[in-house]
Amino acid sequence: MSHINKFHCINFQVTKLKMWPYFDIAHCVMCCLAVREDLGSGSIPFSRKHPIACWLSTMMVVFAGGFLAALFLGEPLLEPFRNTQSVLLATAVWYAMFYSPFDVIYKLSKFLPIKIVIAAMKEVYRCKKVYDGVNHAAKLFPNAWMILFITGLVKGNGAGFIKILERLIRGVWTPTAFEFLQPSFPTKACIVASIIFVLDKKTELISAPHALVYFGIVIFFVYFKLSSLLLGIHDPFIPFENLCCAVFFGGIWDSMQRAVTGGNKNAESTAKNEVRASKTEDGQTHAHKKND
């Protein structure tokens, strides 16, 4: 019984874990890394030449979930900027990541042991954002499950959905980078987490304690993030997607149609070849008769 009580205590502590300031710092660091990696080798020249655009695009990535949630829920669009401490913290991390002497902060954040810790903290932060998004929407629209789900999704991975606009601020227009065209693993994971949180909050389908559900989703996020960094497993949903597409979205029928039409085409081509061969043989027979 003591082990069970300790386990429940750990679950409860995870749900009540304070994000400020360490987890917020990890979130900001990972957002800055994403911006720098998206800029590629031109990140340093761009930050020197366009510091305002660099700062604004980074802030959009850091507060993307808040911007989109405010937009969807009819709240002021600049709602995330109400917290001056968060803005100052994000600005300080941005400055350190782009303008530190000899680029030392960026190089440290890229050092694998440090990056593993930061990435794990970021995923704990992501889970908290999904949960907070569902709860916040539930207060405004208690019976609108779809709104709860969408708010949790965009709070968890708003940077993916705002990527087009964030790149546009940096002078790059990539309309094909819309997240729903090529959803990333964080988006898929946030979809699953948001659905589970909505079901846990609004139904009796999940009988497990809330703390255990929350802890399980945290482990889910952290495990697959570390698997991506250490093992190169970037999207474990692909086999399930292929199966789902084959069963529910016409994959089986398309394969059957290709098999049938392919068989007919082969039969037609075979018949045409036979006709051509027979004509050739007839021509040769007539030629022999004339020679005789």
Image: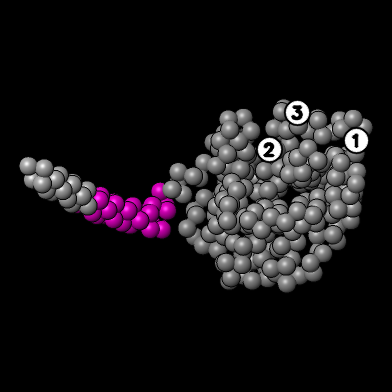
The question of residue 31 being in magenta is answered with no
Q: Nearer the viewer, residue 200 or 70?
A: 70
Q: Nearer the viewer, mark 3 or mark 2?
A: 3
> Is disc 2 placed on a helix, strand or loop?
helix
Mark 1 and 2 residues: CB-CB less than 8 Å, in contact? no
Residue extent of the magenta highlight? 243-271
Instruction: Please give the residue where the numbered disc 3 appears in the rendered image.
Output: 111
Q: Quadrant of residue 112?
A: top right
Task: Give the spatial CA distance, label 3 vs label 2.
Answer: 14 Å
Q: Residue furthest right?
A: 101
Secondary element at image label 1: loop
Q: Label 2: which residue?
A: 120
Please tell me which residue is depicted at 90% across the width and 39% down the height of the picture.
99
Q: Amino acid at mark 3?
A: Phe
> Which scheme is used to colour this image of the protein?
one colour
What residue is disc 1 on? 100
Given the image, on which type of amino acid does mark 2 rest? Ala
Q: N-terminal of the two: label 1 or label 2?
A: 1
In what element is the residue under mark 3? loop
Q: Position of residue 157 (x, y in %)?
A: 67, 52
Pointer 2 local density, CA inside 10 Å: few below 14, some 14–19, many at least 20: many
Q: Amino acid at mark 1?
A: Ser
Name the residue nearer the viewer: 225 or 138. Answer: 225
Q: Is residue 286 left or right of residue 200?
A: left
Residue 198 versus residue 184: which sits nearer the camera?
184
Residue found 55% across the figure and 42% down from its top? 235
Question: In the rendered image, is residue 270 in sight?
Answer: no
Q: Earlier in the sequence, mark 3 or mark 2?
A: 3
Nearest the eye: 2 or 94: 94
